Amino acid sequence: MTAYLAGVCSSALSFIFIVFAIGTIGYLVGGIKVKGIELGTAGVLLVALLYGILTHYIPSFTISEKEIFLFNAKIKGNFGIVSNIGTALFVTAVGLIAGPKFFRSFNRNTLSYILLGVIIIAIGGGTAVLFTVLDKNMSSSMAVGLLTGGLTSTPGFSAGKECVQAIEEDVTAGYGIAYLYGVLGVVLFVQLVPKLLKINMADEVKNFQAANQIKIPSPKGKLTSMDPFGFFAFFLAVALGCLIGAIKIPGINFSLGNSGGCLIGGLIIGHFAHLGGIDCRIKKETLNFMRELGLVLFLIGAGVPGGVNFIDKFRWSYFLYGAVMTTVPMVVGYIFARYVFKLSILNNLGSITGGMTSTPALGTLIATAGTDEVSAAYAATYPFALVSIVLTAKIVIMFL
């Protein structure tokens, strides 16, 4: 009986089962509403983190001399693959959604988005440097981990670990400590601000759509559709994005990575909408599905290892530092967007999610606003924030 039970557990607790079980429970948690506020898809992240924390204490157990693994090096690698695929799906979908209007809508707001991306990251980097100076026991590697976790920036996290001077375990632990608040803080911010300001979201959406009406020309000539769902165009955008992301700038060893590259790839394919005589237009339903699927996979893939690392070297002071590195840039960015750049609330919050490089927050904002057109502000701000956080991570470790 115990041998049979061991076999059942081994099959049931397969990697695929774990991923989908986390997703199932996560959506249940995310659907709980408290005074109109809900975690939504971020509930998946919470459950993934809790699973990671559990596996820190119970990485495996034995039934009838058969060892059942909940987490090990191989499983960790699998979660990394899930996270990367999720990121590629999500940002490519965002790029394809924003692409038809993105390059045709450059106006005075475009400079605001660029500046916001740089300002938000600069404020975050400044707080990281400040805490490094104030807390002599905290390494610059830990500070960069907290900063990239607080800004949920995987490329920044990777850039920090690549530095020769970096203490890799400190960067990893700091990222895990700050990541939870980094996600939930921005997710709750984009839901709470409209409620606190008592904004009529329906009116804001109407005004937003009226102000952003752009005529999108149809591709000329007869086009051939390769498949009914647009998978050819989607996969093309991902492949193009990976190539773009792999290009490195000599000297500083900087690249956009798969996340930034896939966003650019999606914007390009979405803008031109065809490849020769091949139709590259994709149905909105397909893009929405890919965006949500990518978001969930990203949260699961990043959340579980983040939960494991959360326990390592945890200190409440570090958690507080990470929370400040999330909150201060976000609030300062909002103030700049509203009072200096005079952006509408939807463009404001869209640019904040891009500046904070927060994939989950954009998903929440789209659900809150009821329109995915806010992706344009995210897409305009994100690349500049991405470049800034990668450079900031390297600078903090190299010179502190």
Image: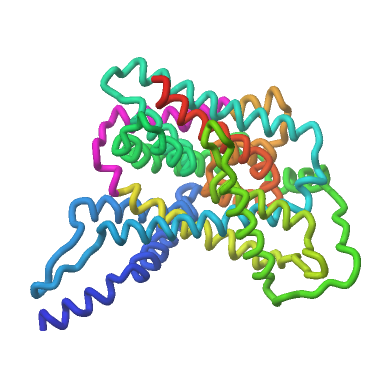
Q: Is residue 107 above or below residue 278?
A: above
In this picture, residue 151 sits left or right of residue 99: left
Q: Is residue 388 above or below residue 280?
A: above
Residue 258 position within the rendered picture, expressed as x and y whole percent measured from the top left: 55, 51
Q: Quadrant of the N terminus?
A: bottom left
319 in magenta: yes
Residue 289 position within the rendered picture, expressed as x and y whole percent measured from the top left: 59, 65
* The residue stretch that appears in magenta: 308-332
Q: Residue at x 39, y 20 (%)?
A: 400
Q: Is residue 195 visible?
A: no
Who is closer to the viewer here, 132 or 31? 132
Q: Is residue 256 visible?
A: yes
Q: Residue at x 49, y 54 (%)?
A: 40
Residue 56 position within the rendered picture, expressed as x and y whole percent measured from the top left: 22, 51
Residue 269 position within the rendered picture, expressed as x and y whole percent measured from the top left: 72, 57
Count of numbered marks = 0
In this picture, residue 301 sits left or right of residue 112: left
